[in-house]
Image (cartoon, helix red, strand yellow):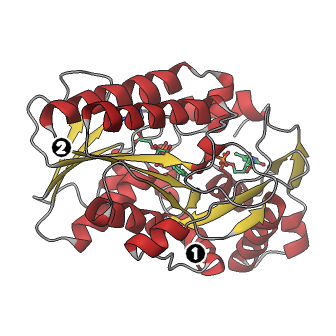
Amino acid sequence: MKLLVTGGAGFIGSNYIRHVLDEYPDYHIINLDKLTYAGNLETLRDIESSDRYSFIKGDICDKNVLDNAEFDAIIHFAAESHVDRSILDATPFLQTNVLGTYNLLEIARQRDCTFLHVSTDEVYGSIEEGLFTEGSPLMPNSPYAASKASSDMLVRSYVETHKLKAMMTRCSNNYGPYQFPEKLIPLFIINALNGKPVPVYGDGMNVRDWIYVLDHNKAVDAVLHKGTPGEVYNIGSRNERPNIDIVKLLLEKVAAKLGRDKDEMLGLINYVEDRKGHDRRYAIDPSKIESRLGWKPETDFEAGISETIEWYLSNQEWWKRVISGEYMEYYKTQYGEDL
Ligand code: NAD
Ligand code: TYD
């Protein structure tokens, strides 16, 4: 099988490519990525020489970008993915997440190929009690979530109108190696390593449902191979945690690994102004993918977090290299101080 992976130089896409190349010795991957600030070929150094892997630098909004490529299925990860950036400027979110997805849907329709759209639980909005199911209404609150919900709607319309063999996944918050340092977990690990304050939004009681990236990717794999066209599959680990609990866990573990004083490390916690429109709680019901496709999350949260901290400790050249001047400017705008 030949898979076209979009956004394969980003966090989840790169881990997915690595997983597929390891798991399926006869599969080929073409990675289409624009290499925005979030996409880095550094992330793929260990596989770039594989004869089962090739890379196209290009924009998913470009109609002709795949003219010379042959593939059996599109696994669509490429997106603008950070909520805070969508609050500062939603334009690239609408371009890539909405128009880019539309362009890929057109390409898939013309080629009559399978399309797996990787989406997020954030399209459901915030939930006070209970869990998001695949039938929950789409009530996105951030421009990021609205752009992803729009792309989900487009995918749905191509299934209904053009009978496209498309499937959709909606996953909760991911963590693990190669995540760009702007997101909560890597940002706080790196700040803790550097002895810098960690900026907790609001009261720190917003709840996210965390999943290890490899568990997410195995779920995407299960949908690709066993999913039913037209269906949506929620992916989650039943692992809800208030942000402040995660922050304390990270700081305590970093302190232990570095042999530093735990209370001094916890002193880095800095409560800052809340994010605009900050969703209070995400919580996913993964029963459908568990019962229909036999997928289950395998990674224990504390073990996954320890491994992730270890990874950021041992791969400091990676995160120092991927942090560009653009990121330094963003950090200053977002947090009012230098990185
Ligand atoms: P990321 O920001 O780390 O990576 C995105 C990748 O897409 C980058 O390599 C970037 O260069 C590429 N890209 C962006 N615009 C492009 C364009 N116009 N053309 C081609 N490539 C482009 O994102 P991620 O965290 O790996 O997320 C991947 C997907 O998973 C996204 O669709 C996101 O919505 C979804 N998702 C993420 C999470 C999470 O917790 N990170 C959870 C659920 C779903
Ligand atoms: P994030 O990693 O940006 O993921 P998402 O917004 O897609 O859930 O944020 C996770 C949670 O952490 C979210 O509730 C916002 C919070 N957060 C902070 O408190 N401080 C920060 O600096 C960041 C980036 C996030």
Residue beneath the point at 13% across and 35% down: 111
Residue 125 vs residue 197, the one in the foreground:
125
Coordinates of residue 260 in the picture (x, y in percent):
79, 75
> Can residue 37 be seen here?
no
Find residue 23 and report its image quarter.
Answer: bottom left
Q: Which residue is mark 1?
A: 304
Coordinates of residue 327 in the picture (x, y in percent):
58, 34
Q: Is residue 299 above or below residue 214?
A: below
- Circle 2: residue type: Cys
Residue beneath the point at 56% across and 69% down: 308
> Can residue 238 be seen here?
yes
Residue 255 vs residue 187, the one in the foreground:
187
Residue beneath the point at 33% across and 61% down: 227
Crowdedness near tag 2: few (<14), some (14–19) or many (≥20) residues, C-alpha within 10 Å: some
Coordinates of residue 51 in the picture (x, y in percent):
10, 58
Residue beneath the point at 53% across and 78% down: 299
Q: Which residue is mark 2?
A: 113
Helix, strand or loop for disc 2: loop
Work out whether mark 1 precedes mark 2 in sequence or the reverse, and give the earlier one: 2
- Circle 1: residue type: Gly
Helix, strand or loop for disc 1: helix
The answer to whether residue 74 is left or right of residue 16 is: left
Q: Are marks 1 and 2 in contact (CB under 8 Å)?
A: no
Report the label total: 2
- Please state, as top left, top right, bottom left or bottom right, where the C terminus lies in the image: top right
